[in-house]
Each structure stands twice: as C-alpha cells, then as structure tokens.
Image (cartoon, rainbow, N blue to C red):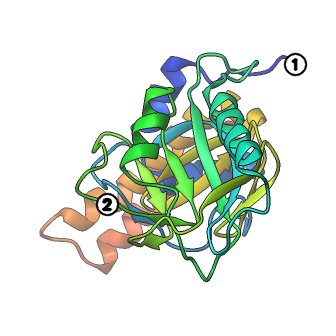
Amino acid sequence: MGVFLLTIELISYLKSFDTPTISNGLDLFRGKRSAEGFTKLPFVSANSKLPPIVGIAKTAKIKASSPSDMTPDLTSKIRLDYYEYMSKKNLIHKQAPSVCLIEDLDWPNLIGSFWGEVNVALHKGLGLAGTITNGLLRDLDAIDKNYQVLANSIGPSHAYVHVLEFGGTIDVHGIKVHDGDIIHADQHGVVIIPEDALSMIKEAIDYMSKKEKHLIDAAKKPDFNIDKLRIAWKKANDEKWKGK
C-alpha cells in the first residue's frame, strides 16, 4: 500500500477542526484511547484566533542560560544551517508546509526567548506554517499576528540563546517529535498524526462529529432532561464505525 499524502486539500480539511477533534479521530485509528502522541502541558498562544497549525515537523534544540562554547563563526554557521534546514520541504509530503518544533534545554527553568519579532518574521518568510516550543515567547505587540507560536510562557530577554542542533528527536511538553512527523496543533496542544492515519482521518472525524452532534443538539433544546439524554445517548452509540 502506498503512502497517503498530506495534500493541500487534506491540510485545509484538517485545519477546519481543533486539535481535540483530531485527537478523538486518532482514537478510532488506534482502536482505543491512548496516553501518548500528544502534549501534556499547556501553551500560551501568540494569537488564539489563528487556525490550527498543520504540517511536517522540523526539529531543533536551543539553550539560553549560558553562552555557546562554540566559536562565534561556528555559532553563526549553525544558525544559518538551521535556517536552511527549516526552509526545505519534506521529500514525500511536498505540498505540506514545515512546522518548527524547538526544545529549549533550559526547561523548566527558562531564561531566554528564541521567539520574537525577528525569528517570527524569518520563519514566516521561509514558509514555515508555525512554531511550537517549550521555550519562551516575547515581542507580543510586534510579532506578525498571522504567524502562530505556541510557547511554554512569556519572557523579556533572549539571554544567551543559541541553536545547538537540528533534525533530531526532541521532547516538547511530553511529546517526542521526530523530523518528518505530521503535526496538528492549536492552543489546546499538539498531536502527531501517524502517516497511516491519513487514509482514514476524514472518515474518523466525520464519524465522531455525528456521534457528538446527537448529544449536543439534544442538550441545546429547551425541554432537555435525563430521558432525552438517554435517547440521544442511544442514537450516538447506534452510529456505526465502518473504518479500520
């Protein structure tokens, strides 16, 4: 069976749902609930009104609490190499934008922000779909309001922040992310969509939405009571999943 691609059409569909809805759909893909594959701690959002971030993970690690032990030339080279890495498209999911995920190794004692007016402008200009980090965010009034950053918290300084490495496995708020993972994220947090799940995620979301609609519609009616809940509950459970 071939790889199911993250196309422009599918990205548009996935962006129309919040991340908890995607998480519900992934429960159907797995055939059970899970305690893995999603972040465990809250984020602050640069702009909670933006749509979800959907794309392919590009990963890196930073540190700000102490100066780099590399030479200035090497520090600068790594930073430029990092930007080049971030700008490259995934070779398989060529239509999908990249998503920047950065682990701040100072966590939980965060010192300096990598994310502010300059890096938001650079990453947006390079085509990134958004940023997720366990680090800090600053320049709230100056950053581009159309670029989403989900950060651990807010701080005033960049301190000694520098890029240490990129392209490897990172940990951001309890989720292990690899270069090339498919990401869905919003102010609720982050989930990784397994590549195999792309073939059925639309059907899973539609199914879960139908189940929930029975309950929500019933609850909004003025004559709602426990008997009406029982009826709606049965209708919801009578919806049959025809997928995996």
In what element is the residue under mark 2?
A: helix
Depth order, front residue of 227/71: 71
Q: Nearer the viewer, residue 32 or 95?
A: 95
The reply, left or right, for residue 172 in relation to residue 127 is: right
Quadrant in the picture for residue 231: bottom left
Above or below residue 111? Residue 79 is above
Q: Looking at the image, is mark 1 or mark 2 earlier in the sequence? A: 1
Residue 47, placed above or below residue 160: above
Q: Dot 1, crowdedness within 10 Å: few (<14), some or many (≥20)?
A: few
At a point 52% along the width and 57% down the height, the residue shown is: 114
Q: Which residue is mark 1?
A: 1
Q: Is residue 43 left or right of residue 217?
A: right
Picture coordinates of residue 244, whole percent (x, y): 75, 39
Q: Seen in the image, is 127 located left or right of residue 66?
A: left
Q: Which residue is mark 2?
A: 216
- In percent of the image, x 62 and y 68: which residue is there? 64
Residue at the location (58% across, 39% down)? Answer: 99
Kindly state the secondary structure of the residue where label 1 is placed: loop
